[in-house]
Amino acid sequence: MNAYQIFKERVRREVPIDSYVSRFVPLKRAGKSLIGLCPFHGEKTPSFHVNPSSGFFYCFGCKASGDIFRFVMDYQKVDFPKALEVLSEYSGIPIQERSGAWEEEERKKEQLLQCSQRANEYFVQNLLSPQGKEALEYLHSRGLSEEDIKIHSIGYALPGFNNLTRAILRNDQEIRAAESLGLLKRQEKSKEPYDFFRNRIMFPVRDAKGRAIAFSGRILGNSEEAKYINSPGSLLYDKGKTFYNLHLASDSIRKTREAIVVEGVFDAIGLYRKGLESVVAPLGTGFTEGHARILKNLCDTVFLMMDSDSAGSKGAFRAANSLRKEQVEVKIAKIPEGKDPFDYSQKHNKSDIRLLLDSAKPASQFMIGEVLEGASPASPPEKKQKGIQKLLDFIKSLEKETDKQVYLQEGAKQLGISYSAIFQDFIGATGKSLTPSVVDTSSRSIKKSNAKLDPAALCERKLMAKLVFHPELFSYAEDLGRFEFLDETSAFFWDYLYTKFLQNETIHPAEILSDENLPREYAEGIGEFLQLEDIENVSPEQAFKDLILQHEVNVYDTKMKQIETKMKESVTPEELPVLLSDLVLYKAERDKRWEFLRASKSSTV
């Protein structure tokens, strides 16, 4: 274990997570866990669990989870290095115990920050120089004042290929740093560096401290080149988790609990200069789940104010869907007259824009409208039928039963079809019931959540949880490697855990739930099982063996059901003996494992 990992383990060991969390969240004892009202979403019934023995928290309502470091980051809205400082100050544990790799990464980050800052200052100087006259006039023609340009630190990248290397880069190390930031590229043949941004108005993307970490460049004049190009991802810049203007907007977002999301830099600047300070824009990748998680921790409501064209509508749909999954209220502010947010802000004041936001419609109406592709009560039957099929396909993708009901009702309303009719179509298409929920999802118990899973999934997820709590059980890796997983989440989790085991990485509940590389849906799928109390009267190894046997029973049961289903259909005389033989074999194997299970359980009584 390296020095950095030792430091993390010392913090976990010496700073009880329940003691720290209880400073902000009143907690009450409930078995091995402590529970309270979740600080990350509004709720009336406690669903926020803190497990002192394992050192992690988990909310059954909003699915927030992680270790003490993640709690500090999410609750106090800070990055990981700052979270270390907070916990170091709280506990008195010095941060000097960082590993060499950690120190090296911090050193590289500082070099990149210095390079990016110098580039931003250079671009600003260019804009104010005689060579930047045309770019400055363009900004003025778009209605930006000198103050707007200063606030957003807008600059200009000169035409030509060697401006940066001549003006601000003094040695090979700085050239490599600029290359890492995407400010420079290499020629294919000569491998000589050249400027990536040329003859472009430069908008710096800044971090929480206002430091330039990336750029968005708009071409000046007519060109066959892309209108906008953005910095690639780097050690400083994660495109899927960074917003343009967030450093200026964050205070207003926290204060109002609202955020306005637009598409581009000009849109953000246009609204900000009119007094709508809680405006941000994703860059490069469009709106991602990472963006949704950031906003979830800052606000309760998001207004999507995208362009009125087809691309804008598709972007709004993706963003609304990502935010819906994070249980953030979303409203769609449609801009009249086919304008984009910047153009609209040019001719309207803050009150006008506020009225537009106040009249924004719920995301459900907008999303269903997009799914139906314009189908309405007046549409021809063929278009309605196509819309119904698209609606049903969309509803199938939803996880929450309440969401399914809401969107089915909205779809029926927009199509002018009775809800009962479209409901019956959905039942027929899925073979599932759809019962209106009157239960507060934030107060779900573990038992209710697990009840949604079939026995095979329950068994496999318990196996994965056992591996997390007892890594010594990886001695059975060969057995699990031959598994026919019936549950997608468990199959993914096995690959994930086994990879960590082979690479000798730490396997710990808090580490698992705090891993940002672990897709959210899989973290949620296993999170509940990491909260289950171990009340078995047998050793972890024996319990694990029993679960393996139970899994094998489930697999044979599944194979038998598949054969029985096939035999009810048309089967040829040649196929029937083979199917019957397989059925007898699977039943014998299943019964054999049942006997092993019974013997195991009776021996522990």
Image (cartoon, rainbow, N blue to C red):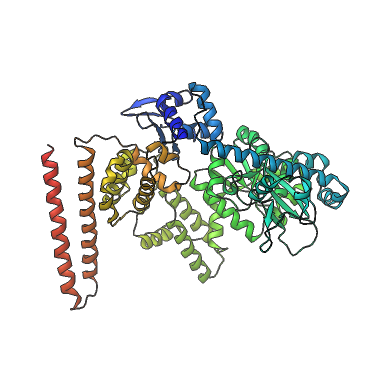
Q: Quadrant of residue 119?
A: top right
Coordinates of residue 541 in the picture (x, y in percent): 22, 41
Q: Is residue 522 visible?
A: yes
Q: Residue placed at 18% from the left, 78% from the top? A: 574
Determine the residue located farthest toward the bottom in the rendered image. Answer: 573
Residue 505 figure quarter: top left
Q: Is any atom of residue 76 visible in this view?
A: no
**Picture mark count:** 0
Q: Is residue 517 above or below residue 47?
A: below
Going 49% across and 29% down the picture, which residue do you hit?
Answer: 97
Residue at (22% x, 36% y) in the render: 536
Q: Is residue 253 above or below residue 396?
A: above
- Residue 37: x and y in percent read 44, 30
- Please give left or right for residue 460 compared with residue 342 in the image: left
- In the rendered image, residue 19, in percent from the top left (x then y), is placed at 42, 23
Front one among 14 and 139:
14
Residue 463 at what x, y percent from top left? 28, 45
Q: Indicate whether 336 appears above or below 37.
A: below
Answer with left or right where residue 305 lies relative to residue 139.
left
In front of the other: 486 or 393: 486
Q: Residue at x 80, y 59 (%)?
A: 221
Q: From the viewer's perspective, is residue 490 above or below residue 537?
A: below
Which quadrant would the N terminus be assigned to in this image?
Answer: top left
* Image quarter of the C terminus: top left
Left or right relative to 88: residue 47: left
Q: Using the image as rendered, state which of residue 275 and residue 577 is in the foreground.
A: 577
